[in-house]
Amino acid sequence: MGRSVSYPARAVVAFTVLEIETEDDWEFEYAWLRDDVLDRATRHFPSLAPHDGWRGREDRILARNAFADFGVSVYGGLVAVWIVERNDGSYWDADWRTVRSPRAQRWLAQIAPKFNAEFGDHDCLGHMSNGEGVYRRRVA
């Protein structure tokens, strides 16, 4: 069965590619990608602060704020840059005292167009029955 790049459920997602000329350059290019998207994200969304973590096994958290995790996932050169409502214990503990989830959903909806324009080079056209995604490069 085929598959596509992973990203957290209900995330705002933008797709791009990691172009690697030789396999030996993979670690360098991946580190450059992480640094680049983190720098751009914190510049465009100043409330994000660097954070090193994971959501599951494939989705790497690079930054977070009071509402959301920001990160990347890579599969075979395809990169999903995503931002999604936080899903950790301390977030839900704080939500229990002062409801955060509706504010998080509103903030994510507000930033989605800017996020997609900044990080998206490809559009996901859909997924085949075996799970493989079909993507198209955006026209500049």
Image: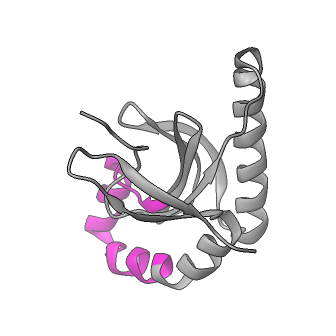
> Which residue: 32% across, 47% down?
89
Establish if 133 lies above or below 112.
above
Q: Is residue 104 left or right of residue 52?
A: left
Is residue 124 a member of the stretch shown in magenta? Answer: no
Establish if 24 lies above or below 134.
above
User: Quarter of the image holding residue 40?
Assistant: bottom right
Establish if 110 lies above or below 38.
below
Image coordinates for residue 1, horizontal then vertical, percent: 23, 33
Closer-to-camera residue (86/39): 39
Q: Is residue 24 left or right of residue 83?
A: right
Q: Quadrant of the C terminus?
A: bottom right
Q: Is residue 109 left or right of residue 63?
A: left
Q: Main secondary structure of the magenta part?
A: helix
Closer-to-camera residue (92/115): 115
Image coordinates for residue 33, horizontal then vertical, percent: 73, 41
> Which residue: 57% across, 46% down?
79
Is residue 89 a member of the stretch shown in magenta? Answer: yes
> Which residue: 71% across, 22% down?
27
User: Quarter of the image holding residue 24?
Assistant: top right
- In this picture, which residue range is highlighted in magenta? 83-108
